[in-house]
Image: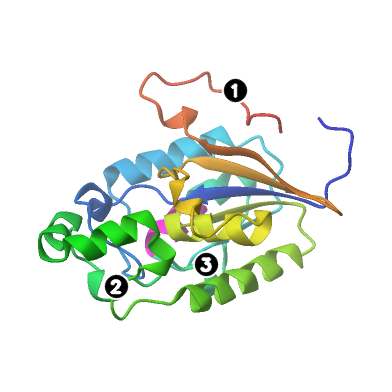
């Protein structure tokens, strides 16, 4: 345990896998449930952090995140707190479409999106400014709460936007960070500094397994 005082420890978790993840479809704000793999991932994640002090679990309203959050909250006797602002970014006309199909039709646009996603969104999608604004509201809600040890369960785009808001990372490059389904990232908020303690920890999801008492890194 570090000797300095922290105001909050935020455990950030992306939801478990869905059929659309497996099919490489854009999900965005479409409400897609967890598949069998996603449910297993949620259970393993819950087991991994069952001994971690957890005061509150915040979640996106979308089913895939809420179901993941419910699994994580259960061992702690908590109910997830829904924040609508934690919903995934709206991908507009790409919602529900397969990446391969989009590549065949609009290869240049998809390549531009891969290079700088928040700033090359498809037609009808949520703008970066609008998305950033609501993620900032979600962060204010979490930081303004009395809870010290919290989990935030959301989506790949949201996790990256949280890194922008909380850590000051560049929104043009933050998509270069991997955000695996049900991986864990830890952010520590102190009076004069916010730090990324670990990112995309997915040891509990590996087929080889881990001892049941494996702990979070550093924390």
Q: Secondary structure at mark 2?
A: loop
Compared with residue 155, is residue 51 higher up or lower down, i.e. above or below?
A: above
Residue mark closest to the camera, 3 vs 2? 2
User: Which residue does the image show at 80% across and 62% down from the upper left?
Assistant: 146
Q: In the rendering, at what x and y percent does residue 118 appear? A: 43, 65
**Mark toward the start of the polypeptide (3 vs 2):** 3
Of the 4 image quadrants, the one containing the N terminus is top right
* Residue 103 appearing in the image: yes
Q: In the rendering, at what x and y percent does residue 151 appear? A: 62, 51
Task: Choose between 94 and 1: the one closer to the eye.
Answer: 94
Residue mark closest to the camera, 1 vs 3? 3
Compared with residue 16, is residue 113 higher up or lower down, i.e. above or below?
A: below
Kindly report the distance in space between the C-alpha atoms of the residues bearing marks 1 and 3.
30 Å
Q: In the rendering, at what x and y percent does residue 197 appear? A: 67, 38
**Mark toward the start of the polypeptide (2 vs 1):** 2
Of the 4 image quadrants, the one containing the C terminus is top right
- The numbered mark at residue 93 is none
**Quarter occupied by residue 122:** bottom left
What segment carries the magenta color? 63-69
How busy is the neighbourhood of tag 3: few (under 14 within 10 Å), some, or many (20 plus)? many
Q: Secondary structure at mark 3?
A: helix
Kindly report the distance in space between the C-alpha atoms of the residues bearing marks 2 and 1.
44 Å
The residue that label 1 is drawn on is: 213
- The numbered mark at residue 122 is 2
**Mark toward the start of the polypeptide (1 vs 3):** 3
The residue that label 3 is drawn on is: 86
How busy is the neighbourhood of tag 2: few (under 14 within 10 Å), some, or many (20 plus)? some
Task: Choose between 64 and 140: the one closer to the eye.
Answer: 140
Q: Secondary structure at mark 1?
A: loop
């Amino acid at each position: 345990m570090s000797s300095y005082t922290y105001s909050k420890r935020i455990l950030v978790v992306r939801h478990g896998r869905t059929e659309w993840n497996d099919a490489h479809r854009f999900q965005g704000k479409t409400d897609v449930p967890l598949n069998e793999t996603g449910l297993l991932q949620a259970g393993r994640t819950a087991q991994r952090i069952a001994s971690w002090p957890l005061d509150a679990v915040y979640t996106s309203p979308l089913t895939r995140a809420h179901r993941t959050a419910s699994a994580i909250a259960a061992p702690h006797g908590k109910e997830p707190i829904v924040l609508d602002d934690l919903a995934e970014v709206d991908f507009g006309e790409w919602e529900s479409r397969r990446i391969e199909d989009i590549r065949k039709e609009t290869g240049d646009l998809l390549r531009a999106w891969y290079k700088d996603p928040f700033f090359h969104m498809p037609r009808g999608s949520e703008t970066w400014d609008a998305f950033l604004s609501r993620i900032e509201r979600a962060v204010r809600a979490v930081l303004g709460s009395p809870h010290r040890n919290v989990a935030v369960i959301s989506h790949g785009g949201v996790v990256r936007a949280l890194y922008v808001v909380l850590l000051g990372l560049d929104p043009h490059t933050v998509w270069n960070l991997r955000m695996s389904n049900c991986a864990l990232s830890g952010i520590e908020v102190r009076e004069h500094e916010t730090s990324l303690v670990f990112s995309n920890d997915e040891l509990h999801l590996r087929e080889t397994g881990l001892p049941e008492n494996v702990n979070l890194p550093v924390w």
